[in-house]
Amino acid sequence: RIGTPDRVKMVFVSGYSGVGKSAVVQHVRKRLQGKKIHFISGKFEQLQPAGPLCALDAAFSEYTNSVIQKGPQCILETKKAIVDAIQADAGVLTDAFPCLCKIIGKPTTTPVEIGPMASQNRFRFIFQMFIRAINSLSYPIILFLDDLQWVDNLSLQLISSLMTDTEIRNLLFIGSYRDNEIDHIHPLTVHLNELKSKEVAIDNINITGISKEDVNNLISDITNMPHSLTETLSCVVYKKTGGNVLFVTEFLKSICSEGLLFYSLDDKAWKWNADTIEAKEISDEVGTLLSRKISQLPIGCQHAIKLLACIGSKCDDSILISFLNRTAGKNDTENNAQFSILDYAIDEGLLKREGSTYMFAHDRIQH
């Protein structure tokens, strides 16, 4: 329905940290694989190590790679559309999003210097023309930006300008945020209210924790035991985690590693003591559990994870190699061994790897 007159232009997915917001959107992304759609994404950082627009820059890096993968013809068509739209002002765009140089080339002219306010207005206009240009091509665009509770003001202004532009038809914006970290004076709330007043079509999806029954279903599946036999364990787990999916999985891993949940070879069944597990202390956040897991990793793995946390939520292995070289004075061969040791973190569910990119499985682990 993207591009139809009654389309929804914005979808917001909200909920508490760890409840599964990003997982829901990534599930949609997988369902759309193979279709003629550019699904691009970025993630805002709490400390914004890369500065404003970091999430949009990550999204347009994905867009650039997507265009390149579609072949020379797609690159030429995209380049022509962008250059025709912004002409001599390409430098303004590539200064903010260097990745676009892979498509349109490095600008030969430097943008004319103007005052701060005029410069910001010029950038917003050129950005809008750029989106119009790539939006006019045959592939609709879905732009997903994660962790909007940490969004910078300039990114919000750009998003709002796109959503109110009647010339942009083949664009769907999806944003996720932690609703417990947003109040009525938060910049995101202010911008959303403005967009609603302009009658921008918005859908809101609020994701909550899973029910006690769902927790029992999960544990029953994991242990391959009847629901009636897992109720005592699932009741304790639900009480300790509130049904938060991330908390549930980490708590189950924790009691397993501590021997409170174990498989009995004699009885050929899973065993536990509900009273002992109920007496186990757990904070209202999963951070304590995750911190304990990190501290149990090999020292080299911990060091690499700390470097990755300083860089951002995800990082290409070539960049990580560069940082490891500087901090430890090691050569590339030695650092390849360092990457092998990161497999421990991947096995523990702390990191994920997609191609050459390492990323944290969740914000709580990075912070």
Image (cartoon, rainbow, N blue to C red):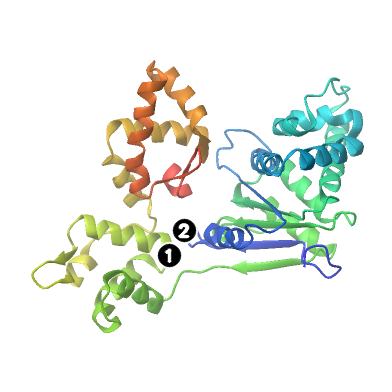
Q: Would you say 243 lies left or right of 132 here?
A: left
Q: Which of the two residues, 141 or 69, is positioned nearer the viewer here?
A: 69
Categorize mark 1 by other alpha carbons within 10 Å: few (<14), some (14-19), many (20+): many
> Closer to the N terminus: mark 1 or mark 2?
2
Quadrant assignment, res 93: top right
Q: Which of the two residues, 231 or 192, is positioned nearer the viewer here?
A: 231
Secondary element under disc 2, as helix, strand or loop, is: loop
Q: Position of residue 242 (x, y in %)?
A: 40, 68
Label annotation for residue 18? 2
Q: Which of the two residues, 177 or 223, is positioned nearer the viewer here?
A: 223
* Contact, mark 1 vs mark 2 (Cβ under 8 Å): yes
Depicted 224 relative to depicted 298: above or below: below
Instruction: Determine the residue positioned at 64% across, 40% down.
Output: 58
* Amino acid type assigned to the residue bearing label 1 in the image: Asn
Q: Would you say 40 lies left or right of 158 here?
A: left
Instruction: Single out the residue that lies furthest toward the left.
Output: 266
Q: Position of residue 259 (x, y in %)?
A: 17, 59
Quadrant assignment, res 238: bottom left
Residue located beneath label 1 in the image = 244
Q: Which of the two residues, 245 or 3, is positioned nearer the viewer here?
A: 3
